[in-house]
Amino acid sequence: MLWGGQIGLASVDQIVYDSGNRRNPFVPLIGAHIKKSEIVPIDEVMKIEGIVFDPHGGSIVLIEGQEYRLGDAYQDSVITDIQKDKVVFSQNNKKYAVSLQDEDLGAYITDSV
């Protein structure tokens, strides 16, 4: 407020909102932050359907109907190597080799590389 060239500030009281155990309306319902414990590791959900091996570097791996090449991202990991019978992923500074078995059994994780 302005009185004769002077500025006066109105007093503001601190207002505290009691939510009564209701959710905060300013927190989005969709897209909330995911906790690390809710992230599923690649070996628990992956299904390698096939590998097309090219010794000259053009190899392709088929995971759940999608084609991936060396350096592609899959979930929160990166494909670091594609071999005739396995694919190596890097996730959280660890490398995992997922081997392709016969078609009835699908892929299985061998170990950290």
Image: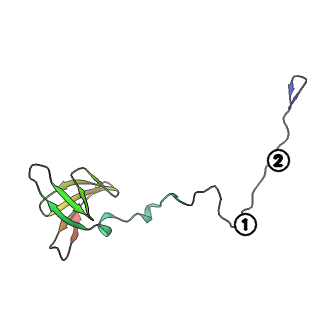
Q: Residue at x 78, y 52 (%)?
A: 15
Q: Residue at x 72, y 63 (%)?
A: 19
Q: On the rendered structure, is 111 left or right of 44?
A: left
Inspect the image, locate mark 2, and give the three-letter code of the amino acid beneath it: Asp
Regarding residue 22, the answer to whether it shows in the image is: yes
Q: Residue at x 65, y 58 (%)?
A: 25
Mark drawn on residue 20: 1
Tell me residue 23's x, y (percent): 65, 63
Q: On the rendered structure, is 11 left or right of 110?
A: right
Name of the residue lying farthest toward the left = 55
Position above or below: 93 against 100: above
Inspect the image, locate mark 1, and give the three-letter code of the amino acid beneath it: Gly
Q: On the rendered structure, is 19 left or right of 92?
A: right
Mark drawn on residue 13: 2
Decide which of 77, 63 is in the foreground and name it: 63
Disc 1 packing (10 Å; few <14; some 14–19; many ≥20):
few
Q: Residue at x 40, y 63 (%)?
A: 39
Disc 2 from disc 1: Cα separation: 21 Å
Q: On the rendered structure, is 60 left or right of 75?
A: left
Regarding residue 113, the answer to whether it shows in the image is: no
Q: Quadrant of the C terminus?
A: bottom left
Disc 2 packing (10 Å; few <14; some 14–19; many ≥20):
few
Tell me residue 78's x, y (percent): 28, 53
Tell me residue 103's x, y (percent): 17, 73
Position above or below: 10 against 105: above
Mark drawn on residue 81: none
Q: Quadrant of residue 1?
A: top right
Q: Quadrant of residue 53?
A: bottom left
Number of marks: 2
Name of the residue lying farthest toward the bottom = 104
Q: Secondary structure at mark 2?
A: loop
